[in-house]
């Protein structure tokens, strides 16, 4: 029943699936790539201005980026004019999706948990380091080609009123920019090739539905004449979300107006008596975009997200009541969450073992009838299995050489990249299967887990320096581009776009997006001053350096963190148990993905919208069935679209007026 609910909730899904005998159209045209290339640095500049300079809104925190939906909406409007007056110049769906893919990947690179953290770390040690802070020992282990130590070069970066385009500044920044771009590009090349190998298993065999793609697919259907824009229910939802957004935006500018309680309201001050005061940060929100995205999720996942959110809160309260929380980090929620991710990875690897075995056999020349059955139209894939595996091998060798150049122990590099890529794969699967609106998994990276489980004494100073510099990779998974790339490949498949060309666009945009992010960041930093104006310009780098000091002091010992290791194992086993129960018990309400996702930070700001979506969808399914659910779907797509469009307009106004405006999503 759950699979039927997923497949029927996207009315156009079957229509977009190509016949096996139909050759793909090109779709990816030169003019589409040119338009996307022009918009990519502009989009990176805008995202950084919103999220880092103006402290909101934060479109990269939610799985469907509001700024890219807004730009797509504007392009659709312009395209309708072209179709009306210059029909032969109008863009078709494949070109629109190409531009959308480029903008989405560039947003992932420029988003709050992306390259901006790396840029913040490049000069942080030299500018803010003092003998009292104890950073010197570690800072000397950082390669000169990944950081800048010249404070005169960094003066304009942190204080502003300068120019990034002075020759000596460009020369100093060029090496670390290229080094970080190479690191991100190698990792993402491997990730994108993994996408090629898992796409058939997830999309063609398991028939996963890629919910995050539904709105852009329906917006671009028919070029500019999408049926979605002729649906009254969609416009009803659009007006509701945009209207609420407009009113609160005006209330932000004119305090005489009383704002509607859509943003964060913290309930923690209501709990003043122990053990209830241990509940921690307890915000409630009413974000329309989160309600709309929640309606797309299966009922069991929506239920599990908010249920396990309270499960974690209950652990904190009980731990306080029993005085167990006197031990640091108890009840080890992050470790339980990481164990859950490992459990999900093991299950997905095991469930697709037959397909992956066929891929390995076909890649090494042992093609059988079984292989042909598993891959009847391999010509539509972005890469052949053999090419993808070779590219993965080349990328992994490149990553190991990169780590060796940093003088990192080979076993540390192998463990780190293995855990990191496994984490990326699970996040990609979560979005592919269920379209969770958040999946940040903040502070759960392999750098944290490796040092906690093994203890810092197991690592040399160069190893810990490497793990410190990995913070831009591991801090959060909210705007990873691996799931974006797989969604783009699936949209190409569904729209009969040449998959190889789309894969080339993805690789090209990854590099272009990285360089655009560096440019947009430094252009603004040398004007405004990163230490005076910017959020991630100093905040995330400071977190990494402070953690580095704790490692240097030997504060993490494997024996003292036995509880965390046990919690990691418990999270893994509970996840596998939930998976087994879902297989054996029809209608089992607890979803292991909900268990994993709810252990992360961002669930705090969407649990109530997901609860509301659960009620709306539950009542619809119970009293109206799938027919009414599908009939109401455009209304909730309208909620998403209206919030994205009006919220992005406020973001544009903040850029134009150089002042803060209404933050429609974020903290």
Image: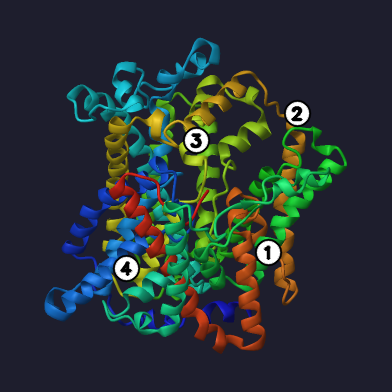
Q: Secondary structure at mark 4?
A: helix
> What kind of element bears circle 1?
helix
What is the number of the mark on residue 73? 4
Q: In which quarter of the view is residue 222 placed?
A: bottom left
Indicate which label's residue lies in the foreground, 3 or 2. Answer: 3
Q: Give neighbour class at mark 2: few <14, some 14-19, many 20+ (Cα, 10 Å).
A: few
Instruction: Compare marks 1 and 4 and give the one earlier in the sequence.
Output: 4
Name which of mark 4 and mark 3 comes first in the sequence.
4
Q: Where residue 528 sits in the image (x, y, percent)?
A: 32, 33
Give the residue furthest to the top: 131
For the question of whether residue 645 can be seen, the reply is: yes
Q: Quote the CA–CA distance across marks 2 and 4.
A: 55 Å
Mark 2 highlights which residue?
Answer: 559
**Label 4 with label 3: CB-CB less than 8 Å:** no
Task: List the residue tagged with mark 1.
Answer: 304
- Marks 2,4: beta carbons within 8 A: no
Residue behind mark 3: 471
Q: Residue at 83% x, 38% y: name it.
A: 324
Residue drawn where x is 64% and y is 55% of the image = 596
Residue at the right extreme, as displayed: 322
The reply to whether the C-beta atoms of the residues labelled 1 and 4 are less than 8 Å apart is no
Q: Earlier in the sequence, mark 3 or mark 2?
A: 3
Q: Nearer the N terminus, badge 2 or badge 4? A: 4
Side of 485 where 8 appears, left or right: right
Tell me the SS state at disc 2. helix
């Amino acid at each position: 029943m759950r699979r039927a609910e997923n497949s029927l909730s996207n009315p156009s899904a079957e229509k977009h699936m190509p016949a096996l005998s139909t050759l793909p159209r090109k779709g990816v045209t030169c003019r589409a790539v040119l338009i996307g290339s022009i918009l990519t640095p502009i989009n990176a500049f805008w995202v950084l201005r919103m999220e880092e300079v103006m402290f909101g809104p934060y479109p990269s925190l939610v799985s469907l980026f509001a700024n890219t939906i807004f730009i797509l909406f504007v392009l659709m409007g312009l395209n309708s004019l072209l179709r009306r007056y210059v029909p032969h110049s109008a863009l078709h769906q494949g070109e629109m999706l190409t531009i959308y893919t480029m903008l989405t990947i560039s947003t992932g690179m420029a988003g709050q948990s992306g390259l901006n953290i790396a840029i913040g770390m490049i000069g942080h040690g030299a500018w803010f380091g003092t003998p009292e802070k104890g950073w010197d020992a570690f800072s000397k282990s950082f390669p000169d080609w990944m950081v800048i130590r010249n404070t005169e070069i960094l003066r304009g970066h942190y204080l502003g009123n300068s120019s990034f385009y002075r020759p000596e500044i460009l020369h100093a920044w060029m090496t670390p920019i290229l080094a970080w771009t190479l690191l991100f590009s190698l990792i993402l090349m491997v990730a994108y090739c993994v996408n090629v190998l898992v796409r058939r298993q997830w999309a063609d065999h398991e028939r996963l539905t890629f919910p995050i793609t539904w709105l852009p697919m329906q917006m671009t259907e028919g070029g500019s004449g999408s049926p979605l824009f002729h649906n009254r229910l969609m416009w009803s939802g659009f007006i509701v979300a945009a209207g609420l957004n407009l009113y609160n935006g005006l209330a932000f500018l004119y305090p005489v107006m009383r704002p509607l309680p859509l943003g964060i309201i913290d309930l923690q001050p209501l709990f003043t008596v122990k053990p209830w005061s241990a509940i921690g940060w307890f915000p409630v929100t009413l974000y329309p975009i989160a309600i709309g995205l929640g309606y797309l999720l299966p009922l069991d996942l929506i239920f599990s997200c908010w249920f396990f959110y309270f499960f974690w809160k209950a652990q904190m309260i009980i731990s306080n009541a029993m005085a167990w929380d006197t031990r640091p980090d108890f009840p080890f929620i992050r470790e339980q969450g990481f164990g859950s991710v490992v459990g999900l990875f093991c299950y997905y690897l095991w469930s697709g073992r037959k397909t992956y075995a066929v891929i390995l056999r076909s890649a090494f020349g042992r093609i059988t009838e079984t292989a042909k059955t598993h891959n009847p139209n391999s010509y539509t894939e972005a890469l052949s299995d053999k090419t993808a595996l070779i590219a993965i091998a080349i990328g992994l060798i490149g990553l190991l050489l990169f780590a060796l150049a940093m003088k990192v122990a080979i076993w540390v590099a192998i463990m780190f990249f293995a855990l990191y890529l496994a984490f990326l794969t699970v996040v990609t699967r979560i979005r592919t299967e269920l379209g969770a609106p958040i999946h940040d998994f903040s502070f759960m990276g392999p750098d944290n887990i490796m040092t906690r489980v093994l203890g810092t004494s197991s690592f040399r100073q160069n190893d810990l320096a490497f793990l410190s510099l990995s913070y831009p990779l591991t801090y959060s998974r909210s705007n990873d581009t691996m799931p974006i790339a797989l969604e783009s490949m699936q949209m190409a498949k569904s729209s009969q776009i040449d998959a190889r060309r789309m894969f080339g666009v993805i690789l090209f945009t990854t590099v272009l997006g990285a360089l655009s992010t560096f440019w947009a960041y430094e252009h603004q930093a040398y004007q405004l001053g990163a230490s005076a104006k910017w959020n991630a310009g100093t905040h995330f780098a400071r977190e990494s350096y402070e953690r580095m000091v704790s490692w240097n002091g030997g504060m993490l010992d494997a024996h003292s963190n036995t509880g965390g290791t046990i919690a990691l194992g418990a999270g893994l086993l509970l996840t596998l148990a939930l998976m087994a129960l879902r297989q054996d018990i029809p209608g089992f309400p607890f979803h292991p993905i909900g268990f994993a996702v709810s252990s992360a930070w961002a669930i705090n700001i969407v649990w109530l919208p997901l609860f509301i979506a659960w009620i709306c969808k539950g009542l619809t399914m119970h009293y109206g069935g799938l027919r009414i659910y599908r009939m109401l779907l455009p209304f909730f797509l309208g909620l998403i679209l209206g919030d994205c469009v009006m919220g992005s307009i406020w973001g544009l106004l903040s850029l134009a007026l150089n002042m803060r405006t209404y933050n429609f999503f974020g903290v």
